[in-house]
Image (cartoon, grey):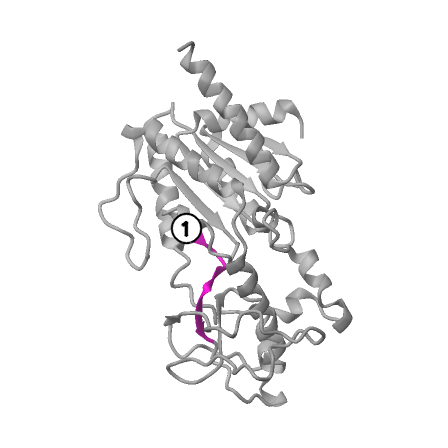
Amino acid sequence: MTEESLKAAAELLNNADFLLIMAGAGMSADSGIPIFATASQSYEHLNLSYDQVACVDMLKKNPRLFYGFWSNSLKKYTSTDAHEGYEILSKWQKRISEKHEGLRLSMAEAVKGTINPLESSSANVFVSTTNVDGWFPRTFRNVQETHGNIHSWQCSGVPQVVTKAMWLNKMQPCSPSLFEPPAVPFAGEVESNTLELLQAVPLPLCPKCQALLRPNIFLFGDGRAFVETRTNTDLYQSWVSDVRQRLAENAALSLVVLEVGCGLRVPSLRKKGEEILRDFGQQASLIRINPEYELNPLVCPPTVSIKASGLETLQKLDHIIMELDSASAGPS
């Protein structure tokens, strides 16, 4: 992390008319939520990795190990506080909306099938995240959770008893309905050595068909079994389309894509941000914050790259932005 890159990023953010936040696992890592490498370490004594446990196949082969993972995850997400970086981003959302009062997006009607219509009070800012902890919807109205949210559950289509002959079968949910997560004592009720859900805890079942219930999260090997009702993909696409139109109408406007903690194992957000940078031309900028992979372009390189953690960088950027505001305001 250099002072030059921090200042360049802060100036872009300070002048932004629209802000698209791309947040990966590295964003929540500063709150103590484990990233892939850390999560996999817990299963080394079982000769398993995180992606082998948190997948559809494990729900069929060993449902108590599958639920052990998601039980611990649910407890972790509900008992952990989001770090200060989320508050900083929320402050920037308010700042951009207030600064550009006359530039707020308006839509004739909410996108059909979405749960969060674009709000005029925050339409200059959008969040797209692969994180499933559900933290962004607490303070942002316009959020695309591309991998779902652990606070919603769905039918898995997997029966309570699965034979080996059924392991390769692709099973579909009985409906697109979403449900509340399993009630206490599900969260954290895990055997310390096997990491399986305790035998005394009943397996969560779909209220409609009595098949096994699962998180409404895009799991490894999911195929089309993931219910995308709440991902807000249509809302995201409409927002990007509207911003594109606004920039085309006014060459003085700018869009900043702020990418925080998006790694290479699941590079979808990195690629999406780079594609916007490529397609929007000189009116768009991409700020990439990552402690390991601050460059590594898939489509085109970022405008500014910062090799550091999300929280530390956001704090420093916020400080610089406040200094820029003070300087522009002049003496009181």
Q: Tell me how many marks there are.
A: 1
How crowded pointer 1 is (Cα within 10 Å; few <14, some 14-19, many 20+) is rated as few
**Extreme-left residue of the structure:** 108
Looking at the rendered image, the quarter that the N terminus falls into is top right
Given residues 250 and 190, the one toward you in this image is: 190
Residue 153 included in the magenta stretch of the image: yes
- Tell me which amino acid carries mark 1: Arg
- Look at the picture and state if 249 lies above or below 186: above
Label 1 element class: helix
Q: Quadrant of residue 255?
A: top left
Q: Is residue 281 above or below residue 230?
A: above
Query: Residue 64, percent across and down?
Result: 60, 79
Residue located beneath label 1 in the image: 138
Q: Going 34% across and 40% down the picture, which residue do you hit?
A: 122
- Location of residue 9 in the rendering, given as x and y in whole percent from the top left corner: 55, 28
| Prevalent SS, magenta region | strand
| Front in this rendered view, residue 191 or 35 | 191
Q: Which residues are magenta?
A: 143-155
Q: Is residue 33 visible?
A: yes
Q: Residue at x 59, y 34 (%)?
A: 313
Q: Is residue 282 left or right of residue 27?
A: left
Extreme residue toward the top, this view = 331
The answer to whether residue 221 of the structure is visible from this angle is no
315 relative to 36, above or below: above
Q: Depth check: give the residue in front, 109 or 123.
A: 123
Q: Is residue 313 left or right of residue 18?
A: right
